[in-house]
Image (spheres, coloured by chain):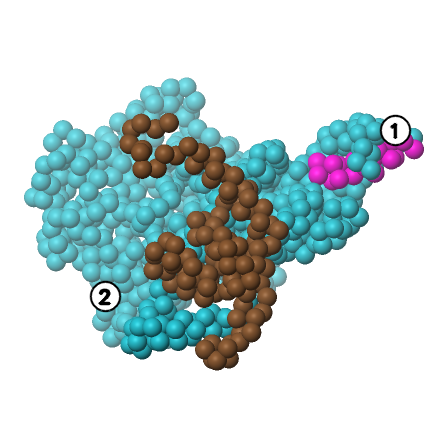
Chain colours: A cyan, B brown
């Protein structure tokens, strides 16, 4: 199209006008023409675009209606895939978002410690009390600090007639409010801790105790001993904060309890957080401060490290960490899972759209004859697939909203799609849908629109051929992903079950542990006798709390027959004589401590691991000494889990010694009755100290609650992924069968039986699934190795897991395809060949 | 039957009426005369090109004159498709317009 005729016409009319009306009017006309043409052109194209758009919509709708089932499979499959992707992304996003709301987040660090003892390193987050102030004084890069101690629950808070024991207390220094961004609704950071007994509470807590009344100035009674005056109210703590509490009190209060905050060797420890200057490099600073503890406490070999605030939630693996923690491992797993599922769904979508487009070759031919340009066809197919995926998007969002409550319960979170709050969301959602639409539209639109109409109409061209490889590849890819998921899900499920049910070496059920109040009990024997008077109390003994890490260990060990120079590290736990009974720990050999044998106060019981490491063949009766205390080995106890359940069992020595916690075995009947009786006894023995207790089996279950959650979520989504893969196979199968009706018809004429044909069709798919296995197995093995590495005790990845997954996939594929094979093989050959 | 805009319809009719002398300028002037509207040249050319692309019109090169600064004219004539499109429009129009009394019509007395 040349534009020159237009200009020629312009000139011509201008010439004539100049002659008729004068040159000025002609010029005015000329210029006005240029201006007028632009809007005219725009309006004209817009008008036509609308008409064309309406036309496309009509065609698309007609297409959809005609192929109802395929459209349904396609759209719902993609919708489900997108919904899964969104749900899992919400989860992942929440985990990564922890602690980012603090303004100074990039400058705040938590102090972590590494203590070396022999060849064992313990990492922790508990630091000496004066560490924070010392760091701030000695290093100009550190401009603020706060000590923190959190007590999650156990203290009773009273106001007038309201009393609750479930408040979470946090002791902190005034620097806390300057460093962290917790917004004050009443009061201010400066006045918050002006007195040693002022407290700051969250909005929820204020409502709990004071309703709508003014909280500031009111006095609450804590643990029956202290009175706190409310000096401020802060906004509720968002759930993506690693620090969770609802009442804040000044750390200085500990001085009133007789603790010297400047004592590096005080029994009380705390978490320390520091804030550094804007331009300071924390790695530099880390090098400088590493040995500060050794300087103040030369007898301890400990180093400190700065842990960035934003890494705390996902990258912490420390003892005694009361922060709300997640694991980076699961973030990776769920990210991968979400992408896998979306990929499977997209591949389905593309596969089906492609397969279907092969059947539309005739329509394409006709359109071209009618004058459709290549661009128009491309636009049409793209339009159809984008519309499909946008519809899927809407469906996906509906699914997500419906499933959110259950998902939140499953994951223990409070997730929601923040449609308007976050400007990224809506464009991101739409973008994902459009991208999928475009990807799935590429093949049919480009491939089909380059057909030559006549050939197509004559049906000569076998469209199926080169698209076959693409489809094969996609199906193999899909099934590989599904098989990987099945394998991983099985392994994870096995491992979690294994750990949960693993024999711990002691009986954890019906055990009540009384913790800190026991520290104050003076006349323990009398208390114990009183406890045993209740029929619900079966046995009681002082001793260490199982699965709590103890720091009693040493290499100062010797035994009869020890080779000089060999150095072993063993952990020592203090027990009382009836401890083993309470926990029903079994002896491999020898006897338990007895309170009638006075020598037992220096004797030892070793666990099997300890015996193994010493190499003694018959340890009973042999002399043994720990840290200089000479005694005799009287028994060997079977290995039991101590410390974290994730760690290996180490060599352990049991000796009679000071351990405060009281471990009580109660009968399963009337647990409440027993509990209240025990509480009464303790309160009488130690008045004024809050009674805190825990059920051991609950503590252990909580230990695994995170893993169990993750496992369950993973399980559901894996089932979903497999379902999607089958859906895709189902859709594909029907098309293939349809396309080959002619072939099947011919075969039948030549005498093939129904079962022959079924076998033929099924065979093809079987090959693909087998191929998928070859890709899937190494990948799954690789991923699972990484995950299992963290566990000291693994249930293992036997070959049977892989075979199970592979066979499972095969069976599922076979069933899906069978349905179509049966239908296809039943076609009447006459019908199939009708079009010839 | 494909729905054409009113302007496109007018363009086709002009091309028919102008016969061998149907090109940009004459079509433009003709439509202006009859409708009385002050169109823009571009506003006529876009539909003209589209009609050609869709096959209702055929175009062929013409001579150039000095007036046109040496640029050649582009003539248009109706194709078969164009003719049948006009026939369709005429059929619809005559049915729709059948019996319209014009000056004697009063509102509300539709028939």
* Quadrant of the drawing holding the N terminus of chain A: bottom right
Vertical comparison of A774 with A203: above or below? below
- Looking at marks 1 and 2 on the same chain, the residue that comes earlier in the sequence is marked by 2
Check disc 1 and report the residue beneath it: A753
A137 and A243: which is toward the camera:
A243
A680 and A84: which is toward the camera:
A84
Q: Is residue A287 visible?
A: no
Residue at 50% over, 71% down:
A5
The magenta region covers A733-750
Horizontal side of A773 relative to A119 (left or right) equals: right
* Quadrant of the drawing holding the C terminus of chain A: top right
Query: Badge 1: how crowded within 10 Å, few (<14), some, or many (20+)?
Result: few
Check disc 2 and report the residue beneath it: A144
A501 and B45: which is toward the camera:
B45
The disc numbered 1 marks a residue on which chain? A
Answer with the quarter of the image where residue A540 lies: top left
Horizontal side of A776 relative to A828 (left or right) equals: left
Spatial CA distance of label 1 from label 2 is: 84 Å
Which secondary structure lies at badge 2? strand
Q: Residue A367: within the magenta?
A: no
Q: Spot the residue most to the left.
A: A217
């Amino acid at each position: 199209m040349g534009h020159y005729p237009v200009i020629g016409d312009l000139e011509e009319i201008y010439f004539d006008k100049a002659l008729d009306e004068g040159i000025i009017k002609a010029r005015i006309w000329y210029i006005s023409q240029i201006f007028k043409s632009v809007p005219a052109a725009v309006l004209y194209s817009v008008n036509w675009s609308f008409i064309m758009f309406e036309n496309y919509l009509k065609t698309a709708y007609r297409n959809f209606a005609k192929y109802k089932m395929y459209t349904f499979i396609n759209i719902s499959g993609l919708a489900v895939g997108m919904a899964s992707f969104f749900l899992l992304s919400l989860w992942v996003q929440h985990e990564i978002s922890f602690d980012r709301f603090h303004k100074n987040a990039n400058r705040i660090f938590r102090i972590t410690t590494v203590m070396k003892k022999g060849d064992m390193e313990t990492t922790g987050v508990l630091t000496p009390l004066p560490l924070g102030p010392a760091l701030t004084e000695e290093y100009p890069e550190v401009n603020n600090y706060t000590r923190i101690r959190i007590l999650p629950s156990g203290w009773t808070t009273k106001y007038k007639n309201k009393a609750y024991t479930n408040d979470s207390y946090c002791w902190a220094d005034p620097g806390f409010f300057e460093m962290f961004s917790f917004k004050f609704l009443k009061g201010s950071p400066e006045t918050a801790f002006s007195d040693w007994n002022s407290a700051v509470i969250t909005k929820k807590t204020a409502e709990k105790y004071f309703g709508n009344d003014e909280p500031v100035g009111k006095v609450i009674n804590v643990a029956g001993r202290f009175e706190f005056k409310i000096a401020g109210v802060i906004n509720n703590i968002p759930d993506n904060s690693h620090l969770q509490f609802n009442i804040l009190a000044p750390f200085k209060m500990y001085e009133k309890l007789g603790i010297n905050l400047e004592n590096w060797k005080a029994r009380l420890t705390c978490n320390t957080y520091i804030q550094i200057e804007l331009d300071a490099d924390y790695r530099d600073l880390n090098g400088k401060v590493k040995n500060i503890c050794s300087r103040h406490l030369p007898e301890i070999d400990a180093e400190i490290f700065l842990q960035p605030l934003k890494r705390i939630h996902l990258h912490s693996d420390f003892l005694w960490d009361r922060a709300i923690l997640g694991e980076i491992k699961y973030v990776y797993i769920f990210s991968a899972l979400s992408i896998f599922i979306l990929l499977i769904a997209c591949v389905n979508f593309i596969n089906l759209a492609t397969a279907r487009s092969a059947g539309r070759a005739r329509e394409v031919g006709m359109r071209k004859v009618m004058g459709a340009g290549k661009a128009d066809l491309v636009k049409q197919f793209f339009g159809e697939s984008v519309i499909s995926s946008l519809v899927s998007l809407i469906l996906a969002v509906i699914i997500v909203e419906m499933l959110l409550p259950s998902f939140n319960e499953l994951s223990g979170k409070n997730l929601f799609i923040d449609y308007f709050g976050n400007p990224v969301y809506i464009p991101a959602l739409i973008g994902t849908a459009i991208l999928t639409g475009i990807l799935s539209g590429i093949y049919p639109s480009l491939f089909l629109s380059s057909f030559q109409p006549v050939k197509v109409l004559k049906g000569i061209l076998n469209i199926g051929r080169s698209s076959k490889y693409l489809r094969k590849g996609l199906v193999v890819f899909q099934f590989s992903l599904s098989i990987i998921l099945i394998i991983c899900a099985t392994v994870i499920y096995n491992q979690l079950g294994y750990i949960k049910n693993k024999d711990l070496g002691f009986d954890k059920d019906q055990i009540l542990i009384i913790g800190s109040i026991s520290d104050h009990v003076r006349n323990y024997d009398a208390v114990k006798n009183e406890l045993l008077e209740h029929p619900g109390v079966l046995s009681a003994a002082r001793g260490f709390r199982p699965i709590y890490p103890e720091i009693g260990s040493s290499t100062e060990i010797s035994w009869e027959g020890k080779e000089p120079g060999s150095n072993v590290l063993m952990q020592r736990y203090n027990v009382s004589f009836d401890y083993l009974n309470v926990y029903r720990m079994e002896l491999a050999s020898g006897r338990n401590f007895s309170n009638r044998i006075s020598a037992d106060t220096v004797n030892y019981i070793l666990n099997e691991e300890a015996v193994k490491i010493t190499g003694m063949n018959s340890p009973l009766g042999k002399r043994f000494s720990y840290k200089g205390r000479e005694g005799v080995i009287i028994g060997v106890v079977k290995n039991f889990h101590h410390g974290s359940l994730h760690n290996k069992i180490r060599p352990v020595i049991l000796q009679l010694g000071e351990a405060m916690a009281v471990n009580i075995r109660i009968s399963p009947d009337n647990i409440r009755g027993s509990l209240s009786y025990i509480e009464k006894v303790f309160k009488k023995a130690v008045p004024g100290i809050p009674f805190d207790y825990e059920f051991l089996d609950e503590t252990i279950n909580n230990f695994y609650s995170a893993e169990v959650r993750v496992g369950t979520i993973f399980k559901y989504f894996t089932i979903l992924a497999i379902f999607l893969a089958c859906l895709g196979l189902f859709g594909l199968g029907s098309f293939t069968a349809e396309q080959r009706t002619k072939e099947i018809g011919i075969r039948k004429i030549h005498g093939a039986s129904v079962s022959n044909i079924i076998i033929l069709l099924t065979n093809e798919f079987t090959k693909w699934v087998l191929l998928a296995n070859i890709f899937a197995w190494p990948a799954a093995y690789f991923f699972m190795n990484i995950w299992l590495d963290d566990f000291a005790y693994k249930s293992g990845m036997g070959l049977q897991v892989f075979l199970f997954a592979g066979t499972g996939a095969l069976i599922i594929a076979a069933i899906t395809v069978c349905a179509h094979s049966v239908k296809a093989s039943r076609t009447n050959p006459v019908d199939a060949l009708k079009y010839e | 039957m494909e729905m054409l805009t009113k302007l496109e319809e007018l363009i086709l009719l002009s091309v028919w009426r102008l016969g061998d002398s149907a090109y940009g300028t004459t079509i433009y002037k003709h439509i202006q005369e009859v409708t009385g509207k002050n169109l823009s040249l571009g506003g006529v050319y876009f539909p003209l090109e589209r009609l050609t692309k869709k096959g209702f019109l055929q175009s062929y090169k013409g001579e150039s004159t000095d007036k046109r600064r040496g640029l050649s004219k582009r003539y248009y004539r109706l194709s078969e498709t164009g003719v049948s499109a006009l026939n369709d429009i005429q059929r619809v129009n005559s049915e729709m317009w059948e019996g319209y009394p014009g000056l004697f019509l009063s509102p509300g007395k539709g028939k």
